[in-house]
Image (cartoon, coloured by chain):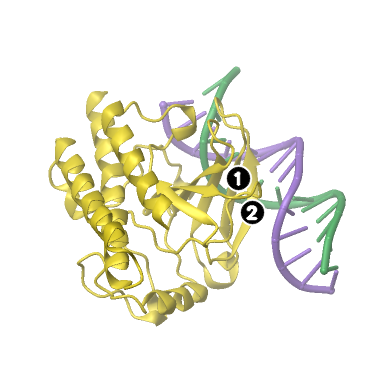
Chain colours: A yellow, B purple, C green
Amino acid sequence: MEDATATTLATELDGLLAMARELEARVGADQGVPGAARELCAALAASVDRAVRLAGRSGNAGGRASVNGQRRSGRKAAAAKVRTQVRVASMQDLGPLDDGLSWRKYGQKDILGATYPRSYFRCTHRHTQGCAATKQVQRATADPLLFDVVYHGAHTCAQTAVLAGMEQQQPPAAFGQEPQSPPEEVQWPAEPVTPFSFPSCCHLTGSYGYAAAGGGLGVDMELEDQLDELFLDVSGIF
DNA sequence: GGCATTTGACCGAC
DNA sequence: GTCGGTCAAATGCC
């Protein structure tokens, strides 16, 4: 049981590290960002990196998609290769706002132990372009203004190419990896990242365990608190 | 009329 | 049997 928890923790930390590095890269590229903010972002990336090491894992830092041990039926497996979780705070009680992509809601379920129902979205272009991306949005029990958003699968539709073109205004080596696929065949990276930009009214406040609303994964509380604090510090700057 | 949302039913894993 | 995820008909909105 502890092995599974450690693996899950490590996977979540991988996602955190990727996001921290992207944030660091973007802040570094923006000359309008105060120096203190850059230092804090660098500290964030370093701290998350240490957290990954502390998680006592090896090999996964290089990146691999994970489904966190979630069971998958056959028809679900196709969209489960890439999974990214973020927590979004909405300034208004309107739900997490548009992330730049077109989503169509196809279901809603009451989740055991969760105060609020979970909404299921898939790409609007699922049928026209075969885009298999889906996302799940669930309001956090502890804070109704926080939304846990879980992305499954990779966007392969044309609008992703448009977004990718906007993203390419930033240095392409945000993750220290080789350049992305060409626009006509855009795919998100195979490891958990934040493949989009949040609108100004939303703050990326962190990445938590899958069952965040139900108490998380039982990860080390001190570590979780530190990460939480770091993300809150960074989000407070912008 | 076309598209998005809602919601109960269904399916697979456990 | 329970639960999470998806389907698809019904409904609403523009």
Residue pictured at 60% horizontal, 65% vertical: A124
Q: Is residue A222 left or right of residue A157?
A: left
Residue A108 occupies which quadrant of the picture?
top right
Q: Earlier in the sequence, mark 1 or mark 2?
A: 2
C-beta proximity under 8 Å, tags 1 and 2: yes
Total count of labels: 2
SS category of the residue bearing label 1: strand
As measured in the structure, the alpha-carbon distance from the residue carrying label 1 to the one carrying label 2 is 7 Å
Residue pictured at 40% horizontal, 30% vertical: A216
- Residue in the foreground of this view, choosing between B12 and A15: A15
Residue A122: % across, % down: 56, 57
Residue pictured at 31% horizontal, 50% vertical: A15
Q: Is residue A76 left or right of residue A12?
A: right
- Residue in the foreground of this view, choosing between A204 and A124: A204
Residue A212: % across, % down: 44, 34
Q: Circle 1 is placed at which residue position?
A: A119
Disc number placed over residue A105 in the picture, else none: 2
Amino acid bearing label 1: Ser
Residue A128 occupies which quadrant of the picture?
bottom right
The N terminus of chain A, quarter of image: top left
Q: Above or below — where is A70 with respect to A204?
A: above
Q: Chain of mark 1?
A: A
